[in-house]
Amino acid sequence: MSHHREFPPLSGASALKPLPSLIFGSRWLQLPLYLGLIVAQGVYVFLFLKELWHLVLHATEFTEQQIMLVVLGLIDVVMISNLLMMVIVGGYETFVSRLRLHEHPDQPEWLGHVNASVLKIKLAMAIIGISSIHLLRTFIEAGHVGVPGKSNYTETGIILQTVIHAVFILSAIGIAYVDRMSASTPDKAH
């Protein structure tokens, strides 16, 4: 005796009653949020090009450490931009509507199997990457801690930033563990 319920196929959106139709349709309220993130992506492209132009113009005047800090800033912008793309594309595909790319040659590999769990783990890993870049920049700039006017960081600030980074890592491990546990637990729905 099977506990699996069979549901008759729906003949389009008209088959839904008004309240379920309203609730299901409310997912489109997220569309302006994703469009806003696309605008934010444009701002990051502008910021990247501005910083890159600054680097090119002043490359001969900068020390190696200053060049490294600017390049880390550029990498940071790229990683945040990647995070934005994951949220925009993955979130839209997961929570609003299918993109229906139909084997488009430029379709991201991960998009074919995206769901809320995969998206959570990818976002957690992106946040760890961004935090790593910030922490590396802090460590490079921290060589001047205690020198007046040379560093914006205190020892306590550096320790707190390191602790926060460690918490991000532990959180990502926790998310992956819970996701793995829930995936391996057989469905016990009645």
Image (cartoon, rainbow, N blue to C red):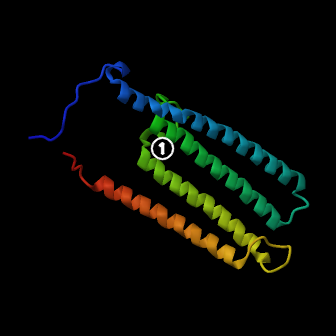
Rendering quarter of residue 18: top left
Rendering quarter of residue 176: bottom left
Q: Can residue 97 be seen here?
A: no
Which residue is drawn at the image coordinates 78% and 45% (left, top)? Answer: 49
Image coords of residue 131 (percent x, y): 62, 62
Count up the numbered dots: 1
SS under mark 1: helix
**Along the horizontal axis of the image, is 154 left or right of 16?**
right
Pick the residue in front: 171 or 59: 171
Q: Amino acid at mark 1?
A: Trp
Which residue is drawn at the image coordinates 47% and 28% (left, top)? Answer: 100
Where the C terminus falls, by quadrant? Answer: top left
User: Residue farthest to the front?
Assistant: 19
User: Residue farthest to the bottom?
Assistant: 146
- What residue did someone put label 1 on? 110
User: Residue farthest to the left?
Assistant: 1
190 vs 165: above or below = above
